[in-house]
């Protein structure tokens, strides 16, 4: 019985490898673009908050509302709502590259709030001391806030990456490719338990590796 299952797995191993690669591709490219969007948003949310170096309640409230609206969307609805935008950006709505667009839009608000939360944990005394020494806004952001909050940002990025892995599985339902797509085609449509269990095990391994790597990097930079 076990030998039969292993032999079956070997026959579909090319599809498993391809789906695993697609999931990794969607996840890390999406997280990269989400960081590009989310980190500046998070920084602006912090420095424009009440009592901070560039207090501006209008900017803070408008950005905060936009971030909250995007965060409140269930991802499967966001995925469908962004179909026209996805087609505009990449020219198609099917495939792993197309899935990166909604994954990025879905993850960026979480990155923004994660960065905001990490930056707010930085001791205000350090910021005030920098201001007293004549540091400008950019110097405080790049040399004080971000370095001091780096361990928290790394842990937050780890959580975001794991969340995007889950989102990427949902993207598979609408033709996004990856392990979610494989699980739907074999596990749901064909009642193939072997493939379903194998995809779940691969996803668990991915999450474990990413969480361990995130913990290691956060501890390393925390010591520095």
Image (cartoon, rainbow, N blue to C red):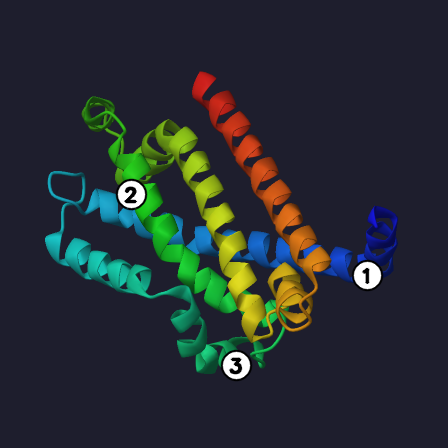
Which of the two discs, 3 and 2, labels the residue nearer the N terminus?
3
Q: Position of residue 5 (x, y in %)?
A: 82, 53
Q: Position of residue 184 (x, y in %)?
A: 62, 68
Q: Position of residue 201 (x, y in %)?
A: 65, 46
Q: Residue 87: which numbered mark, if any?
A: 3
Q: Are marks 1 and 2 in contact (CB under 8 Å)?
A: no
Residue with the mark numbered 1: 12
Residue with the mark numbered 2: 116
Q: Position of residue 100 (x, y in %)?
A: 54, 65
Which of the two discs, 1 and 2, labels the residue nearer the N terminus?
1
Dot 2 surroundings within 10 Å: few (below 14), some, or many (20 or more)? many
Q: Is residue 90 left or right of residue 77?
A: right
Q: Who is closer to the viewer here, 101 or 46? A: 101
Q: Residue 30: which numbered mark, if any?
A: none
Q: Are marks 3 and 2 in contact (CB under 8 Å)?
A: no
Q: CA distance from mark 1 to mark 3?
A: 31 Å
> What SS does tag 3 mark?
helix
Disc nearest the viewer among 1 and 2:
1
Q: Is residue 10 left or right of residue 135?
A: right
Q: Who is closer to the viewer here, 96 or 46? A: 96
Which of the two discs, 1 and 3, labels the residue nearer the N terminus?
1
Q: Is residue 43 left or right of residue 223?
A: left
Q: Is residue 224 visible?
A: no
> What SS does tag 1 mark?
helix
Residue lying at 43% horizontally and 76% vertically, measured from the top left = 82
């Amino acid at each position: 019985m076990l030998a039969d299952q292993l032999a079956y797995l070997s026959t579909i191993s090319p599809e498993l490898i391809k789906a695993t690669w697609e999931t990794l591709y969607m996840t890390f490219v999406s997280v990269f673009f989400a960081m590009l969007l989310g980190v500046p948003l998070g920084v602006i949310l912090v420095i424009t908050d009440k009592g901070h170096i560039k207090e501006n309640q209008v900017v803070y409230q408008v950005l905060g509302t936009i971030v909250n609206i995007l965060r409140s969307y269930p991802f499967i609805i966001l995925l469908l709502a962004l179909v026209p935008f996805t087609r505009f950006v990449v020219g198609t709505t099917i495939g792993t590259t197309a899935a990166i667009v909604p994954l990025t839009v879905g993850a960026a608000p979480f990155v923004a709030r994660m960065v905001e939360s990490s930056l707010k944990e930085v001791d205000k005394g350090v910021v005030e001391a920098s201001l007293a020494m004549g540091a400008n806004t950019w110097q405080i952001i790049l040399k004080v806030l971000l370095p001091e909050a780096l361990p928290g940002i790394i842990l937050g990025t780890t959580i975001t990456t794991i969340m995007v892995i889950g989102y990427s599985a949902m993207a598979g339902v609408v033709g996004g490719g990856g392990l979610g797509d494989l699980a739907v085609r074999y596990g749901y449509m064909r009642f193939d338990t072997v493939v379903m269990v194998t995809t779940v095990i691969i996803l668990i391994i991915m999450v474990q590796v990413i969480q361990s790597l995130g913990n290691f990097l956060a501890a390393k930079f925390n010591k520095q």
